[in-house]
Image (cartoon, coloured by chain):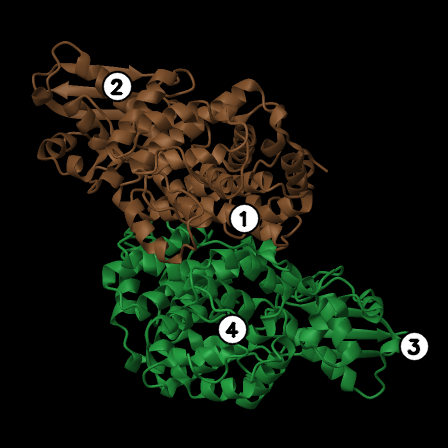
Chain colours: A green, B brown
Amino acid sequence: MNDQAAALSGLSRRLADFVHASRPDDLPEPVRAHAMRAIFNGFGTALGGSSDEAVLRLERSLAPFSAGEAATVIGRPHKRDVLTAAFLNAAAINVFDFDDTHAGTIIHPTAPVAPVVLALAEMRPVSGEELIHAFAIGVEIACRLGNAVSPGHYDRGWHITSTCGIFGAAAAAAKLLGLGQDEILWALGNASAQASGLVETLGFMAKSTGVGNAARGGLLSALMAQAGVEGPPKPLEGPRGFLKVCSDAPKPERVEQGLGRDWEILRDMFKPYPCGVVLNPVIDACLTARRRPGFAVDRIAAIVVRGAPLLKARADRPDAATGREAQVSVQHAVAVSLLRGAAGAAEFSDTAVNDPEVRALRAKVGPVEVDPAVPIEAAHVLIRCADGSSFDIAETAALGSPARPMTDTALKEKFAALARYGCPALDADALAERLWVLPRAADDAGAIMALARPGHNDGSR
Amino acid sequence: MNDQAAALSGLSRRLADFVHASRPDDLPEPVRAHAMRAIFNGFGTALGGSSDEAVLRLERSLAPFSAGEAATVIGRPHKRDVLTAAFLNAAAINVFDFDDTHAGTIIHPTAPVAPVVLALAEMRPVSGEELIHAFAIGVEIACRLGNAVSPGHYDRGWHITSTCGIFGAAAAAAKLLGLGQDEILWALGNASAQASGLVETLGFMAKSTGVGNAARGGLLSALMAQAGVEGPPKPLEGPRGFLKVCSDAPKPERVEQGLGRDWEILRDMFKPYPCGVVLNPVIDACLTARRRPGFAVDRIAAIVVRGAPLLKARADRPDAATGREAQVSVQHAVAVSLLRGAAGAAEFSDTAVNDPEVRALRAKVGPVEVDPAVPIEAAHVLIRCADGSSFDIAETAALGSPARPMTDTALKEKFAALARYGCPALDADALAERLWVLPRAADDAGAIMALARPGHNDGSR
């Protein structure tokens, strides 16, 4: 048996055993702290996205099929059943692409996983420690599967946040439900039957259909397993299993390499801007250019952006028509950040896209030039002025990248700004304060959800 | 632009326009009749599957999340919301693999599509003609997408009934909901974000998770589109759309070839046996052998089966442990049909698999031998006896194949047997009678669903 065959044999079963055996104490302190920050950041982006039209329309279509009000939809007045709440919270967390990003796979792991543990925590009391542990385990499974199928999986067109996220969601739910080893394996099998999501939907509301589905489907996979819905023994490594079907060149050995020792969540990054992570270094470069002496927008003749192949593949989009498309448009991001000196939610709204000044400047941004040697956290922006002068900015480590992470203060500011933008009715300070000490919630971590519901932020359930 | 590029350009939009423009009168009479037979057959297999353990466990896991009782679950006492009913009916129709099969793609099109139009027909009154029309349109979309990705799609491991079925379900729902052209396109986009299902799950309960999801997800995709959840303009033909992502060599031109003229539903076959369609010729050959003079089970020394590559790929399974696995096991099918002279639901139960006589005989069935020249509706069975004699049967056109379709009488017998097997409490005759005249239901075709609910078969709603 060669290395890859050995890595494949029994993989799903061993992964189920890992999920089963893991205990909260197994998490190193930095992992626990990072998980808490990821959940905190996720609440912020969910509040920001909670009034987005895509999320509102999804809620409108799903509400008639929600049985009862067991779980909170972050930033929304009505509770829903746990599956519906998980769907909507995942959609809201990710809708602006402002949530966390796992370096290497560009999975947004919090969106599919956190809503599942939060919804379950409202079904029956769990401690903050248990909640964060189940979340970290789910993120780990999602990102490790992502490692095994990257980069080909995303490149071919699978929306990795959804396709790998559903396994993380299933694992997290299975852990918090206290399932046995066989049931955890079945949960992975039920997730394999539902793993979906296409990159083609990015820039459109249907992206959120896939992401919401990953959270809902993962939670449902675990509940199905609990009800005895059996899955195949090898949903991941089987000849017609997830790894082979959804990757042209899977690296199954990556799933277990360092499992339980090297935590993937530590490679999870928080984003300063509400758009595709590939745009971060481009925006940083533009904001730097704007601060240079002599810079003036009206002098600009042409702009050339050079970056990683993924920057072009994902975001070379000169004709974005909506805020959603603008989130994956180099041309819009360059224009709006040079003009306004900012790149927040307002800069990626439909209004911003239709601003005549933004449109005029973006027409001066050429097609993205590719340099295969440039990593995704770097980019180069060359601004040529009408008088022959130019501004030449090379950004090597975007804000939010592993080399230059956001500080706790910056995360708190981001949270507050998003809450103001998407859910001004909420007492966001009270929620932020309690979230920051979530790991210390002794018996009922889910009680925090009441603070995320506008009009019900007195802390009662 | 070459032929393929031309076929790709604007494909999703044109397909949405076709769904939008199609009228019940456009269906040729044979298409309407075949659609009615497919729905009739689907009710039969749903009744047979309604008490299967997989379906019961799925119902147990989904019931707490069903909001109200708008729609009937065939053969079950409790109504559920339309999404949940669509899921469970799809699962039940397909659970034994006894439902219809589209020649060429081996899609089971009724399972994902029929539950959607039946559930919607309980939400608001529609005529039998409208219902059958929407169903035929859905089957057409599913099978044509299947043509475009076959055979590589299934071979690689996608469960084509689920992955293509969700688009058919979305189209059928969009048609019956009367959506506009843009909304139909969005429905296809929302379906593309949810298209999933792996062959690895076949033989396990998780298969039904995928199939149920195709029906539910398709219906939801259309409801989302109705609520304004926008999708991408090219969910099928885009560079990261369904055809390219989920096929190594898509043939997009197959989607529209003869659209509206050559109806794929006429290539939909009904199955005499409750197992993978690839097993049909094998079972026919065994039943023939059994009728040969001098045949006696206790004289058998060894059995060799030779057939199409797909027969081996899908069903070379010497160690099936459950009824579900037995449905895709050549070795079990050969043993049980030779022993019992029958191949009904009882022959593919857990009990049958654990019958010591069946196990002893199946141990004499060798690995499947492949002959690439053999089509899937044919197979060769060689039975060697201990005394050196042998029985050598070549089946060229299995019962249920296009060359040898089941008669209406045989379909009615199959329906009655399945109803007795899975739902003996139901007045199946009354249901069968009304189903047979469904095309003539003038105003409220959905009223028929009351007859499919045990204890409520008086025809009232």
Above or below residue B313? Residue A106 is below
Q: Crowding near pointer 4: few (<14 within 10 Å), some, many (20+)?
A: many
Could you tell me which chain the residue with mark 2 belongs to? B
Q: Crowding near pointer 1: few (<14 within 10 Å), some, many (20+)?
A: many
Using the image as rendered, state which of residue B122 and residue A226 is in the foreground.
Answer: B122
Q: Which residue is mark 2?
A: B285
- Per the rendering, the mark at residue B191 is 1
- Per the rendering, the mark at residue A74 is 4
Above or below residue A92? Residue B133 is above
Left-right relation of B213 to B263:
left
Left-right relation of B26 to A170:
right
The answer to whether residue A122 is visible is yes
> Do discs 2 and 1 share a chain?
yes
**Residue A8 sits in which quadrant?**
bottom left
Q: Residue at x 33, y 77 (%)?
A: A126
> Do discs 3 and 4 share a chain?
yes
Q: CA distance from mark 2 to mark 4?
A: 61 Å
Q: Point out residue A260 in the picture as x, y percentages from the top left corner.
A: 32, 74
Above or below residue B123? Residue A363 is below
- Per the rendering, the mark at residue A387 is 3
Mark 1 or 3: in front is 1
| Residue type (three-letter) at the residue carrying disc 1 | Ala
Q: Residue at x 54, y 43 (%)?
A: B170
Could you tell me which chain the residue with mark 4 belongs to? A
Could you tell me which chain the residue with mark 1 belongs to? B
* Secondary structure state at the residue bearing disc 4: loop
Q: How many marks?
A: 4
| Residue type (three-letter) at the residue carrying disc 4 | Ile
